[in-house]
Structures are given as C-alpha cells and as structure tokens.
C-alpha cells in the first residue's frame, strides 16, 4: 500500500473517529436524568447553539393549562444553565418516591431527552420517564421476583362486527399451573387504548410486586380497547400509523358497554378462570370509570367488585343508547343483587371532583354501600397507578 493511500485512509479514519466521538458526547456520554443518592435529580442536554433550554415535568409546581377537558393543572417549567462545553443542566432538589415524566423545551420547541431512551405515549404526546425509588414507587419497578406474562390477543366481537386487540396479564406460574384464576377487567381513559394501563399504568410491575408480597391474590388482568371504532391501538390495528386522538366517535354512547360481554366470553373461553360473579372485578380511570359504572349496572350479577378511579361521571349528549336508560332502577337492582366492594377514588383538585361528590351523595341517599378514597392531586396517572395498588389487594379475598 503506497504512502498516498495510507495518508488518505488515515484522514478518513480520523474523520470517522471524530464524528463517532461527537455522537458519543451528544448522547451516550451525557447522563440525564442522573438520580443522586439523596434523590435529587440532575437533567442535562448538549445543545451548544440553543438560546434557552427548559425542563417541564410533573415534579415541578403546577400551572393552569387549557385542555380538551377544560382548564386543568399542568406541569410547570424550570430553566437550565449552559456551561462552556454547550451542556445545559439543572439540579432538582430531593424528590419523593414516584414515577415521573418530563420533556425539554429548546427555544420554545418541546422535545424528548436524547440521553434517556425510556418514554411513554399518552394520547399523542411522548415524554421521558424515570423512577425515584422507595415506598409505593418500588411497586412500579421490575424487581427480582417471579413475573407474570403480558400478551396481546385478538378476539372476535360480534357486538362490534370486528376482531379486536386486547392486552392480558397472567400471573406468575400461570403457564405451568392447572389452577383457575379470578379476573380483573381494567379500563383506560379517553385517548387511551389497550396499551395504556400496561405502559402508563405499570400494571404488570404492580401486579407482580403485590402478588410476590402476598398483598394481592394471583389474578388475570384484562385490558381492553374502549374505542369501539378501533380494532387496535394506533400503530397496532388495521389503520396502522395515524395520530391518536383524545376523543373518538361512539366512545361514550353506550356501544362499548353494550358489547362488553364479548370480552368476557372470550376470556372465559380461552383462559383458566373462575367464571362467576365472586371472581370478576371491573375498574377504570376517567372514561374507564364511566364505563365501569355503566357496565356493572347494565350487566346485572356479573361483578362483585367495582372500582371508579376519577370517574368521568358527566351528562353527555351522545349518551342515548339503551345502556343509559332506567339508570336509577338498574343501579338499585345492582345494589339489591349484592356485591362485595364498590370503591370510588378521586384527587382533591381533579376537575371531576364535584361530579364525583354529587354521585357519592346519590349513593348515600340510596343507602348503597360504597367506599370512598380521597387523595391529593388531580386527573393524573400518578393517582391512578396508586389507586390500582390500593384496589387490587381488596379483590377476591
């Protein structure tokens, strides 16, 4: 190999090496977020040409925001400072145990952290996540214990005229066991789908940990898609890739509730379950709480356990289906049939707080047995994950 070729090759390798080092410095060589021993957290971003960088996340003081559901509390913002190397950083004081989400705002543009590959999608927004451990947050972690399985199945829904995708958690040991198990049907909120509870809600981790600690009975958890015009989540169904929407047609008009028996039939035909009222539970957040209220009332003697998490108890112009007729009579019939737990939980600053208080007064006026849990905070996954950790141990005892 002559000298000229060697010089050209050396120059090429130096250029490649410099580019590789730059890429390494831009991403993998920066730790963000860095969780310190005292549970303070440092965020970093390499953006030498940026004029301003902010972080926004649910660990910051809340601000009022306009949303499709009206004005609600949203995450605040905090400024990062740039050093001589073009790295922006901010250290947040000690945080309590929790799963947190955040994103960066670079010169007004909201984006994710390139140094953190861990993200969640909520409706059409993707944000980074991290966990500060301890207390209830340890239930959100994958720990060194026995694990259940999570599968995505397709079931035939004659009531909706299509095959549909569903997420199902089976407890540790299910595959090798001959036992039968109780079932929790766990419903998502508006803008969610069959991926919501497993991804945003950390259902598999919560159930694995509660079962390992002996705090919850081994159970199957069924997480359906409550959007009746979808056969699967955006990117997972026959419509393939499209932007998820917060509310879709026919979501809360009674169609889903009326066809819910298709889901129960599929589960009880394909899984080893205890197919009776005493071994069925149903719960949901926001829109899923609305669905829970009406499904449990419309399908009498089907569920012994009901959980309404920040339930969207509100009048709707499209709620004209048969499911919503004779509300008082069917609610009384549900009470007269008997059940083991009717559990309602909501945060003090939730925009649905007043509606839930009015519903509680209705139940009290009927002498309908129920339990009520009031927490801090608003209409957030931070509350709904905790509600699941509180509700699941009460089931099938």
Image (tube, rainbow, N blue to C red):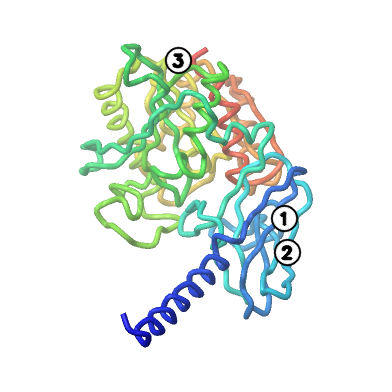
Q: Is residue 47 above or below residue 181?
A: below
Residue mark closest to the camera, 2 vs 3: 2
Q: Mark 1 near mark 3, Cβ–Cβ under 8 Å?
A: no
Q: Is residue 360 above or below residue 7?
A: above
Gap in Å between the C-alphas at discs 2 and 3?
A: 53 Å
**Residue in front for this viewpoint, 238 or 6:** 6
**Residue in front for this viewpoint, 214 or 264:** 214
The answer to whether residue 24 is visible is: yes
Please report whichever mark, 1 or 3, sits nearer to the chain's N-terminal start.
Answer: 1
Can you identify the residue that label 2 sits on?
A: 78
Please report whichever mark, 2 or 1, sits nearer to the chain's N-terminal start.
Answer: 1
Q: Position of residue 126 (x, y in %)?
A: 50, 58
Can you identify the residue that label 3 sits on?
A: 337
Crowd band around label 3 with a 10 angstrom C-alpha radius: few (<14), some (14–19), many (20+): few
**Residue in front for this viewpoint, 151 or 385:** 151
**Could you tell me which quadrant the N terminus lies in?**
bottom left
The answer to whether residue 394 is visible is: no
Can you identify the residue that label 1 sits on?
A: 60
Image point (24%, 36%), residue name: 155
**Image check: 62 left or right of 198?**
right
Gap in Å between the C-alphas at discs 1 and 3?
A: 46 Å
Q: Is residue 347 above or below residue 229?
A: above
Residue 174, image quadrant: top left
Crowd band around label 2 with a 10 angstrom C-alpha radius: few (<14), some (14–19), many (20+): some
Of the numbered discs in the image, which one, if any, rests on residue 148?
Answer: none
Please report whichever mark, 2 or 3, sits nearer to the chain's N-terminal start.
Answer: 2
Residue 131, image quadrant: top right
Image point (35%, 14%), residue name: 180
Gap in Å between the C-alphas at discs 2 and 1?
A: 8 Å
Of helix, strand and loop, which one carries label 3? Answer: helix
Q: Mark 2 near mark 1, Cβ–Cβ under 8 Å?
A: yes
């Amino acid at each position: 190999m002559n000298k000229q070729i060697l010089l050209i090759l050396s120059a090429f390798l130096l250029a490649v090496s410099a580019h590789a080092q730059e890429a390494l410095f831009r991403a993998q060589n920066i730790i963000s977020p860095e969780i310190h021993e005292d549970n303070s957290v440092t965020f970093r971003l390499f953006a030498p040409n940026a004029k301003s960088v902010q972080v926004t996340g649910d660990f910051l003081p809340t601000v009022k925001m306009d949303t499709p559901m009206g004005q609600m509390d949203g995450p605040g913002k905090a400024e990062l400072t740039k050093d001589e190397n073009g790295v922006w950083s901010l250290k947040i004081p000690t945080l309590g145990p929790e799963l947190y989400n955040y994103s960066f705002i670079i010169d007004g543009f909201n984006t994710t952290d390139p140094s953190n590959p861990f993200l969640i999608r909520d409706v059409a927004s993707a944000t980074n996540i991290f966990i500060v451990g301890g207390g209830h947050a340890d239930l959100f972690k994958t720990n060194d214990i026995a694990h259940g399985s999570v599968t995505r199945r397709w079931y035939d829904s004659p009531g909706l005229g299509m095959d549909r995708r569903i997420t199902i958690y089976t407890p540790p040991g299910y595959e090798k066991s001959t036992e039968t198990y109780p079932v929790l049907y766990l419903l998502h909120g508006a803008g969610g789908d069959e991926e919501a509870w497993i991804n945003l809600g950390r259902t598999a981790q919560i159930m694995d940990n509660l079962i390992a600690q002996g705090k919850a009975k081994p159970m199957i958890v069924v997480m359906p898609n409550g959007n009746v015009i979808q056969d699967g989540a955006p990117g997972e169904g026959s419509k393939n890739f499209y932007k998820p929407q917060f509310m879709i047609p026919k979501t809360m008009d009674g169609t889903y509730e009326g066809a819910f028996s298709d889901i129960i039939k599929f589960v009880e035909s394909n899984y080893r379950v205890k197919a009776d009222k005493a071994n069925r539970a149903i719960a949901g957040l926001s829109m899923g709480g609305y669905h829970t209220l009406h499904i449990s009332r419309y399908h009498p003697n089907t569920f012994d356990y009901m959980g309404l998490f920040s339930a969207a108890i509100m009048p709707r112009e499209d709620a004209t289906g048969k499911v919503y007729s004779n509300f008082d009579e069917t609610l009384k019939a549900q009470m007269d049939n008997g059940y083991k737990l009717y559990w309602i939980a909501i945060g003090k600053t939730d925009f649905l707080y007043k509606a839930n208080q009015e519903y509680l007064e209705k139940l009290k006026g009927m002498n309908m047995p129920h339990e009520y849990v009031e927490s801090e905070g608003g209409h957030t996954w931070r509350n709904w994950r905790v509600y699941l950790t509180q509700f699941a141990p009460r089931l099938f005892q």
